[in-house]
Amino acid sequence: MKLAIASDHGGFELKNYIMESLVKEKYDIEDFGCDSAESCDYPDYALKVADAVACGNAEFGILVCGTGIGMSMAANKVRGIRAAVASSAEQAKLAREHNNANVLCIGGRILQKEQAEQIVKTFLTTYFTNEERHLRRVNKIMEIEKLK
Ligand code: RB5
């Protein structure tokens, strides 16, 4: 499975930890930066990962900033992206099962490393249910996007 990952300075350390963990599990992962803990702007990195997912170069994206919130706001501006912030494995699971989220956003200043690892792995191994009601609602989200 091909993944795209990025962070800002607030998520840099956690991104490195998550990447190491995913590489050990043989995920094919492309790092879109940032490359140090120096202050930078999260929308620049959200856009790189969102573009990679939206154009099909990556199946899923992972974005890490201080809270996960700014990254999700920015990523959700890109057509085709359904980015979800998760602070628990349950949220990550439901973001996949009900919302068919394709980008996971997590907070390096919110989560412990092991917690984050569990959230990421849950997200990557959970399938969208494809149930009619969830599909209908996700399609409605994508329709909103078409009108903007
Ligand atoms: C950076 O200080 C911080 O604002 C950023 O990492 C993120 O939490 C934004 O949502």
Image (spheres, grey):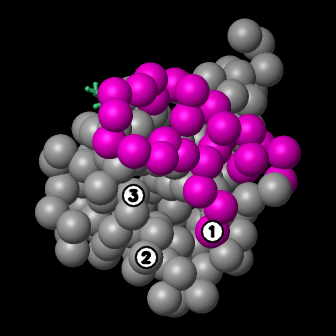
Q: Amino acid at mark 1?
A: Ile
Return the x and y of residue 3 as percentages of the image width and height: 64, 64
- Label 1 and label 2: CA atoms lie apart by 10 Å
Disc 1 is placed on an element classified as strand
Image mark for residue 20: 2
Is 46 inside the magenta-drawn segment? yes
Q: Label 2 is placed on what type of residue?
A: Glu
Helix or strand or loop: what does disc 2 sit on? helix
Label 1, label 3: how far apart the Cα atoms are? 12 Å
| Figure quadrant of residue 15 | bottom left
| Residue linked to disc 1 | 29
Q: Pick whichever, 98 or 122, lies toward us.
A: 122
| Local crowd size for mark 2, using a 10 Å CA cut-off: few (<14), some (14–19), many (≥20) | few
Within 8 Å of ligand 1, the CB of disc 1?
no
Q: Secondary structure at mark 3?
A: helix
Find disc 3 in the rendering and name its residue.
15
Identify the mark nearer the N-term, 1 or 3.
Answer: 3
Residue 134 visible to an observer of this rendering: no
